[in-house]
Image (cartoon, rainbow, N blue to C red):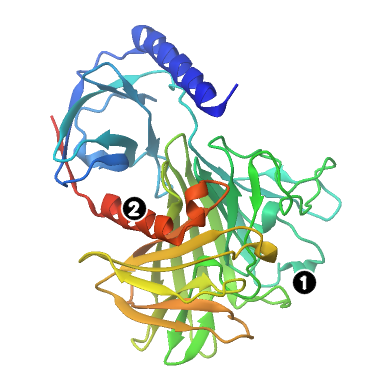
Amino acid sequence: MNEMKRYTLFASAGAAILTLLFSQCQTATKDIEIALTNTATIDLTDKAISIDRSEISDLPEGEVFPLIVSTEGDTIPSQLNDLDGDQKWDELFFVVDLLSNGSETYSLQWVSEKPQYVVRTSARFGKRSSADTPVEPATSETLYADDLPKSIGFQRYQTDGPSWENDKVGFRDYLDGRNAKDLFGKTTSLMSPENVGINAEGAVEDTYHVMADWGRDILSVGNSVGIGGYALAVEDQLMRLGVTVDDSINNVEETTFRIAAEGPVKSVLSYHFENWHPNDREYNVDETTSIWPGMYAYQNTVKFSGLKGDENLVIGLVNINNQNPLEEIEMNDQWVVLFTHDMQTYDRQWWLGLALIVPRDLYQGYSEAPETGQLSKSFLAKLKVEDEKPVTYYAVAGWELSDQGFKDPDFFKSYLENLVSQLSANVEVTIK
C-alpha cells in the first residue's frame, strides 16, 4: 500500500472514531465559534493557529479535550499544550488550510475522551543511568558541568540528546554539552521509530548514520553548532554555549531540559542554561524549540539574562561539506534568509539546502567562523540582542530524498520564499 493511501485510510478511520467520540462523549457546555480570516493574498497550508487559554471563556471543569469541527463537518486535529509547566494547559493549537483572503468558521466542542488523530509531530528523549543499564524513555533531564561523556566515560543519551520531527524532516540536539543542532533527513511522512539510536540490548548505539525505511542522519556537524545552534559574540570573539566532544567540564553549571509538549500537530522542547560562564562573564539562557506539520523547518526562540550590552547573538549554519557561497535574501519587512545549497551531506552524497530565517529588524549581517576552534566551520548570522528579550528564528533543511525538487537550488530558493510568505501571513482569530 502506498503512503498516500495509507495516510487516507488513517484519516478516514480517525474521522469515524471522532464521530463516535463526539456522539458519546460531548460535554454539556455550549459550543464556541472560532472564525479565522486569512488577510494575505496567498493560500495558506498547515498555517499554525495558537489560541491562549485566556481567550476562551466558560471552560468546563475537569479533564476535557478539544474537538474542532469545520462548517463542512471535517474534524481539525488539535491539542492543548502546557508550555510553562504549571500542570495547566495554556495553549490551544492546530493547523489549517485557508484560501487567500478567505475566512472559515469552526466550532470548538469539549469531549471527555481524548480524540485520536494522525500523528504529524513527535519528540523523543531517552537516557541511561550507567554504561551497563538500558536506555529508558524520559521527558526531562538535569545535566551538571561534570556530567559530560568525557567525564563519566559513556554516552548517556539516546541520539546524544532529544530529537524532534514532523511529517517532513527531523532534527536532534546534542544535550551532552555541545548544544549543536543536527539533521535527520526523512523519506516518509510517518514518524521515525522510538528505538532510533538504541540497539537490541537497549544500549546507546549509532545506528542512524545508515539508511533506514524512515531516513537517516545526513549532516556532518563537527565543532560547528549545526543548523540553528547559537552563541554570543563580542566583537570578533565567539563564546560558545557549551563545549566540544573533547572537553570533560562544561562551561554551563546546570542544564535543564524537558519535553514541554508532544502531540499530533505540535511538539515543543524547553531548555534552561543556568550560570553559563564563557571567559569572565556569566549568563542564563532560556530556549524553546517548536515544530508543527508541513514545513521543512523548526522554530527556535532564545532569551538571555545577564547581558552587558556589547554582545551580539550569532546563529550557525554549518559549512563543512558545502563548497558554494552563502546567499542572502531580504524577503520582506519581517525576515531575512541566509541559505546554502550543495551536496553538503556526509561524503557529499546528496543535494541538501540549508537555511536560516532571521528577523530583519535585528539582523546585522553575517560572518564566517574559523576553520578550527571551539566553534568552527560555520556561517554565522549576526543579530542584535537585548537582555531578557526573546529572539525567534527558523532553521530549514530540504533534502533531495525528501523531495526530488531540492536537487535544484532554484527550487529550494522558491520553497524558502513561499515558506517565509506563509510564516509572515496574518490570520485574524475571532472567538465567540
Which of 9/281 is in front?
9
Determine whether the residue tagged by mark 2 lies in a helix, strand or loop: helix
Q: Quadrant of residue 392?
A: bottom left
Residue visible at 39% across and 40% down?
81
Q: In what quadrant of the picture does the N terminus appear? A: top right
Q: Could you classify mark 2 by the number of other residues whose Cα lies within 10 Å: few (under 14), some (14-19), or many (20 or more)?
A: many
Residue 150 image label: 1
Q: Residue at x 24, y 73 (%)?
A: 361
Where in the figure is residue 369, as x and y percent of width and height? 53, 83
Q: Is residue 256 left or right of residue 355?
A: right
- Of tags 1 and 2, the one toward the viewer is 2
Q: For numbered disc 1, what is the local secondary structure?
A: helix
Q: From where the camera sits, is residue 270 visible?
A: yes
The Cα atoms of the two marked residues, 1 and 2, are separated by 40 Å
Question: Residue 186, image x and y in percent?
Answer: 58, 45
Does 201 sit left or right of 121 as displayed?
Answer: right
Q: Is residue 391 above or below residue 184?
A: below
- Nearest the viewer among 357 and 159 is 357
Position of residue 64 measured from the top left corner of the image (x, y, whole percent): 37, 24
Q: Split into 4 quadrants, where in the image is the C terminus?
A: top left
The amino acid type found where label 1 is placed reads Lys
Residue nearest the observer in this picture, 61 or 80: 80
Q: Which residue is mark 2?
A: 419
